[in-house]
Each structure stands twice: as C-alpha cells, then as structure tokens.
C-alpha cells in the first residue's frame, strides 16, 4: 500500500470528529482504516456480510468485478488456465512467483509422493453411514488429519507449516476420491506416482479392481482446468472462515476443515450443483422457451442458475476457458444419450442469442460449464462441491500461510449492533406472569 501516512478521511458525528488514515492499494479502491474508530470515537461500523470491509491486506489474488478480471499474483486467470496447469498455479499461489523448471519438478515430486493417506485413516471412513454426503466425510477426515500428522501442526514452525501445506494439497484428491468410493460402495483405489494430479484423481474415482481406468487426456485436461479455475477467489466466505479460524492459532488441518464446512453451504460452493438441478427441472429441450420466459418475468421467482455472477458484473473471466473444456468434453463423450446435457447445450445457445440476457450481462459463468463437464464425466451432483473443495485447498492454504506470517495478526473479533433487552433483574418463577 502507498500513501499510508499522507492521506486521511474525517468522520464527523455529533460533536466528535475522527481522523482516519486512508490507504491506496496497488489495485482496487482506496480503503479507510477504522481500527482506532472505537478508541477515538466510541462507535463501531455496521457492515453485515463485511461487503464494504477489508479484513486483511493480501498479495495473492485480486478481482475486479466490473472489468471481469481475476489475477493470481498479477497473472490473469485465463492465461494461467490456457498455458499452465494446476500444480504450477499452486506453486504460484503459495510462493508468489512462477517456478523454474527445477523448482516445479521438485514441487510436483513432493506432492506426488505424499498422496497416500495414513492407513489407519481408512477405518475413519468406515465409521460413516454409507449414505453420508461426501462433504460430511471430507469435513471429518480433513479435521482428523491433525490426529494423525502431529509433526505438522505447530503453526509457529516454518518447516511444519510447509509439511502441512504439501500434505493437504497432496492428500485432498485421495480423500475426495475415497469419500466418493465409499458412498457408492466400491473399494478404495490407491494413488499412483506415475500419473499427474488430475489423472490420478480421475483414476482413483473411476477405476475398479475388475478393470483399470484409462485416463483420457481430454478429460484429464478438463479436470485440471476445473482445479485451476477454482484455486483461489480472494476473500470469499470459506477463505474468510479459514482466516478467522487461523487467527485463533488453530492447526492447519482444523482451519481447512472449517473452510470445507463453509464451502458446503449452497449459497457458496453449491452453485454448479444448483445449475444441474435446474437443468433437471427443465428436463427436455422443448421446455427451454418456457423457462427463458420465466427468467424474464419479474413476478416469477425462477432464475437461471449458472448465469451471471455476484462478483463479476460483466463476464466471468473463468467461463471462456471452461466453455472450451466443456465443448471438448461433450465432443468426446457426446450428448445424444444424456437429455440433461442436451438441455444445457441448447439453453446456452438460447440465452446467448437473447438480447435480454446480453443487456442484463447474464452470461454463462464458470459454474454452468463446470457442472456440465462433471455431469458428462459421470460424477453425481453430490461430488461437485467436494471437487470444488479439493481445488480451493491451495487457495485456503496460501491465505492461511500469508496470515500466519503477518505481524499485524490479531484474533478475529467482529462487533455487533445489539438490539436485545437491556439489563434487567432475575425474577423467581412464582412471580412471573
């Protein structure tokens, strides 16, 4: 930040005036530092959802919703998704720069050789009901990692923080795949060191003992792009949850489990699942005009899921790359025998051709295309959010590491606008009316 001491904002109320420092970030709007507002003015600010409050300063990810821009360490997401791959993006998020060939090889080797779980953790899976949601399993298993990996829970030890980082990135695909296998009643498939990150995950999900799973490079590339495009998204709800848990000094596995729990909420991580549920509701191609008309009707609560974005007011910069992957996957697997995918393709065409959606800037977003891809690959909708959690793990860890190293770190303690009863005296039950 620049101009840290030269600019101030004056807040005046009643007979009080408070001078507050203003900071200028390298990108985005200026911010007013209100940390001393209570001590100097005796008041708090009121900001439900913290949508106008910066809870930290960060160098990891920047979003400009108006421009449709998403940058990781300054690199546009579309360039990374087109030219890079997930583990290289992981390195960038974690360490701030793109790796050299040697650095990338060493990082990939570390991740690859830490993908197996402690064998006793297999028993932990078997404690869940067969019909447990995969996200419920992931919350429990990731939190339980702190009970198995005691040598990487000391947040004050830089080496242990690094070990925990590698373990979480490496083992999350194994945990997610095992959660899936458990819910469908199939044997667990162990990771293989000769496969890349995305291919390993697909094989662990779809291979069976009777026959191996040959990973198609188009599907592997599409999965890698899903991981890349979901790796980090600034200070969203789950990332803020990880940071808040971290501010108490909680171990990294507990913090990431908290992030997974938050992501489970349908308003956050369930957007692509909601999109597929909408496509199921539409059902057949001939009903698309009906639902397009409903989406335009202000008096109808129906909304097209997977179109538009809360943050991106123009277009989702991740959607263009994801659309390319969706087209490649559907060309490979076809849509003839899947009515839901037929509806998705025709709905996309209808919405893009309709001036109403162009004027409202309701373009297909990353969730629309990722849901189509995962459906085509054969994943049930219950696995959409676990895959999102798998991809977002590196973002959570990057934010966690940044916060741990911040000398200004304080335990999170939001204030409140209290609207309840004021002080009153206890009365005996006999005298209460």
Image (spheres, rainbow, N blue to C red):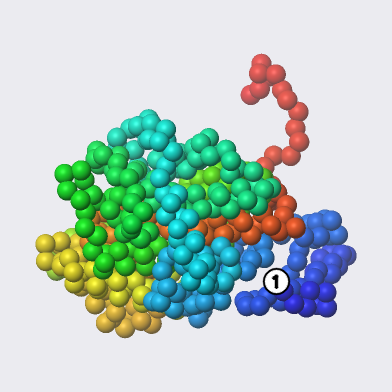
Q: Does any portion of residue 279 appear in the rendered image?
A: no
For mark 1, does the 10 Å Cα neighbourhood hold few (<14), some (14 to 19), or many (20 or more) residues? some
Farthest-out residue, front: 102
Residue 276 % position (x, y): 28, 59
Q: How many marks?
A: 1
Give the residue displayed 33% in from the left and 57% down from the top. 194
| 26 relative position to 42: left or right | left
Give the vertical position of 105 relative to 9 (above or below): above
Give the residue displayed 83% in from the left and 78% down from the top. 6
Residue 250 % position (x, y): 62, 43
Picture quarter containing residue 333? bottom left
Give the residue displayed 72% in from the left and 55% down from the top. 409
Q: Which residue is mark 1?
A: 31
Give the vertical position of 288 relative to 45 (above or below): below
Between 253 and 129, which is closer to the camera in this rendering? 253
Give the residue displayed 48% in from the left and 71% down from the top. 101
Secondary structure found at label 1: strand
Give the vertical position of 381 relative to 101 (above or below): above
Between 146 and 291, which is closer to the camera in this rendering? 146
Farthest-out residue, top: 430
């Amino acid at each position: 930040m620049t101009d840290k001491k030269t600019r101030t904002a004056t807040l005046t109320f009643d007979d009080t005036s408070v001078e507050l420092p203003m900071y200028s970030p390298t990108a985005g709007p200026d911010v007013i530092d209100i940390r001393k507002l209570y001590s100097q003015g005796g008041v708090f600010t009121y900001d439900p959802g913290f949508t106008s409050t910066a809870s930290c300063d960060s160098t990891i990810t920047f979003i400009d919703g108006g421009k449709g821009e998403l940058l990781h360490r300054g690199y546009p997401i579309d360039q990374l998704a087109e030219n890079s791959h997930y583990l290289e993006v992981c390195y960038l998020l974690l360490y701030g720069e793109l790796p050299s060939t040697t650095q990338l090889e060493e990082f990939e080797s570390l991740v690859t050789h830490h993908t197996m779980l402690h064998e006793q953790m297999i028993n932990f899976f078997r404690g869940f009901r067969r019909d447990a949601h995969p996200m419920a399993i992931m919350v429990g298993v990731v939190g339980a990692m702190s009970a198995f990996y005691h040598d990487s829970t000391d947040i004050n030890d830089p080496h242990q923080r690094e070990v925990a980082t590698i373990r979480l990135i490496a083992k999350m695909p194994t945990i997610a795949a095992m959660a899936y296998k458990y819910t469908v009643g199939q044997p667990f498939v162990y990771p293989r060191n000769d496969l890349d990150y995305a291919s390993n995950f697909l094989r662990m999900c779809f291979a069976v003992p009777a026959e191996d799973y040959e990973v198609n490079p188009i599907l592997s590339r599409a999965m890698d792009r899903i991981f890349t495009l979901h790796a980090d998204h600034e200070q969203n709800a789950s990332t803020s949850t990880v940071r808040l848990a971290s501010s108490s000094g909680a171990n990294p596995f507990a913090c990431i489990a908290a992030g997974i729990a938050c992501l489970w909420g349908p308003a956050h991580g369930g957007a692509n699942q909601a999109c597929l549920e909408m496509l199921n509701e539409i059902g057949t191609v001939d009903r698309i005009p009906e639902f397009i008309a409903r989406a335009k009707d202000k008096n109808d609560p129906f909304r097209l899921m997977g179109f538009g974005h809360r943050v991106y007011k123009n277009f989702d910069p991740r959607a263009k790359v994801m659309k390319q992957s969706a087209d490649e996957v559907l060309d490979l697997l076809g849509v003839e025998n899947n009515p839901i995918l037929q509806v998705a393709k025709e709905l996309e065409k209808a919405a893009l051709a309709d001036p109403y959606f162009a004027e409202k800037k309701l373009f297909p977003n990353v969730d629309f295309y990722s849901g189509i891809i995962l459906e085509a690959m054969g994943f049930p909708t219950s696995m959409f959010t676990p895959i999102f959690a798998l991809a977002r793990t590196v973002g959570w860890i990057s934010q966690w590491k940044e916060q741990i190293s911040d000398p200004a770190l304080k335990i999170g303690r939001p204030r409140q606008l209290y609207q309840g009863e004021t002080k009153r005296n206890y009365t005996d039950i006999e005298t209460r009316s």
